[in-house]
Image: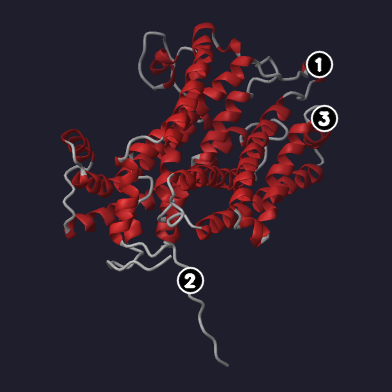
Amino acid sequence: MHAESVVRRPLVTGGKTVHDITNDICSRVEEKPSKSWLLAITLSLSVLIIAGYYVYRLLWHGIGEWGLNKTVGWAWDITNFVWWVGIGHAGTLISAILLLFRQRWRMAINRAAEAMTIFAVICAAMFPVLHMGRPWLGAYWALPLPNTFGSLWVNFNSPLLWDVFAISTYFSVSLVFWYIGLIPDFATIRDRATTKIRKAIYGALSFGWDGASKTWSRYETVSLVLAGLATPLVLSVHTIVSMDFATSVIPGWHTTIFPPYFVAGAIFSGFAMVLTLLLVTRRVYKLEDYITIQHIELMNIVITITGSIVGVAYITEFFIASYSGVEAEQYAFLNRAFGPYWWAYAAMMTCNVISPQLFWFKSIRTNIASTFVISIIVNIGMWFERFVIIVTSLHRDFVPSSWAMFYPKPADIGVYMFTFGLFFTAFFLFAKFFPVINMAEVKSIVKATSEKTDK
């Protein structure tokens, strides 16, 4: 029997050389802003400024501007907080875990995914900060410091406080990991700079990078150490977020399946957002030779796997509720599916369980248009998942006399749109002034030759 191994498809197409990679990526930073970029940044800044009015009203009038009521104390604020934290998971997963597993296909997409993580966590942090009402006094309320108001000490037994430590640690490690990876590329842009201002700015950002073998050795060591630190954080952050719910006694929340279910859902939504952003960046910046169909297909496979895990978790929740014999628990899940918020549950199931299964077909998971549409659908579904978990579990509790409906007010929607404006403004600025692809890593997977093959 004779068998031949199949040659793997190249991760960089078009016969690119090391010199081509430098030119293609650096030119996006060096050239004048394009009309499409100016239009995009104008739209995102407009959303940021207009929606900022609702942030002002919230700070001036208090959180009574939101549609919260006595029964539904958590609604859009926590829904959006958990949604943004989930989106921030894919960046560190792509960078850290895939680095440890030596998966080379991560090299073209990790930079943008890491940036997305940083911006998504900042957007998530907006909601607990704004929820303070007067965040400028937050140091008195949130930090364990002696103060003039008496014994105002934080409760270290509360998962809400664990959130603070987990997310701040995750943000810090992700930020350092992202910036360390940028240093060699900043040095490349510095060396190509034609103006004193550009050379000074990128020279300061590159921290005196000299490209020596000892410098590269330390760079790789630090990258591996940070990847090792970030890997447990990927699992711990959303696990701790899920404990905000799982440690309560509210029907629909008090379940041990939440930690793995939330982590899978976070990776699911995070990869979908990475695809949404990268497909646009790939087209606008003409990076088809670096972000290839193979990259898109592999990310779609991850979405299919995690989406299937999320679907199994939904079924498991229903089974455990029916098997438990607890009437309140059984009613909570029946109310989700057939109560007044049935439309949110239907949207969640359609977007998160059914739509990713289309990626089993190779023709769909390798199609740019279908991938873009499904990636948006997945993120819509994951938002509805958080809404369903929070609102439908609260609006009908143990006492029927306290049942109430939640209706969002303009301030709820406005603050949410503010975070969108913040996220996309930050991402567009990153895509213009920072190298959107990790040149140093991509160069390691192409042949260092001056000969360029025909396309």
| Placement of 333 over or under 361, stated as above or below | above
In the image, what residue occupies the spot 33% across and 36% down?
Answer: 32
| Disc 1 residue type (three-letter) | Ser
Task: Measuring from the top left, give residue 441's x and y in whole percent.
Answer: 33, 57
Between tags 1 and 3, which lies in front? 3
Q: From this viewpoint, which residue is outermost toward the top?
A: 61
- Give the secondary structure at mark 3: loop
Q: Quadrant of residue 429?
A: top left
Disc 2: which residue: 8
Task: Measuring from the top left, give residue 143's x and y in whole percent.
Answer: 39, 22
Q: Nearer the viewer, residue 14 or 230?
A: 14
In the image, 349: left or right of 7?
right
Q: Earlier in the sequence, mark 1 or mark 3?
A: 3
Disc 3: which residue: 339
| Disc 3 residue type (three-letter) | Gly
In the image, what residue occupies the spot 46% across and 27% down?
Answer: 422
| Disc 2 residue type (three-letter) | Arg
Disc 1: which residue: 401
Task: Measuring from the top left, give residue 167's x and y in whole percent.
Answer: 45, 35
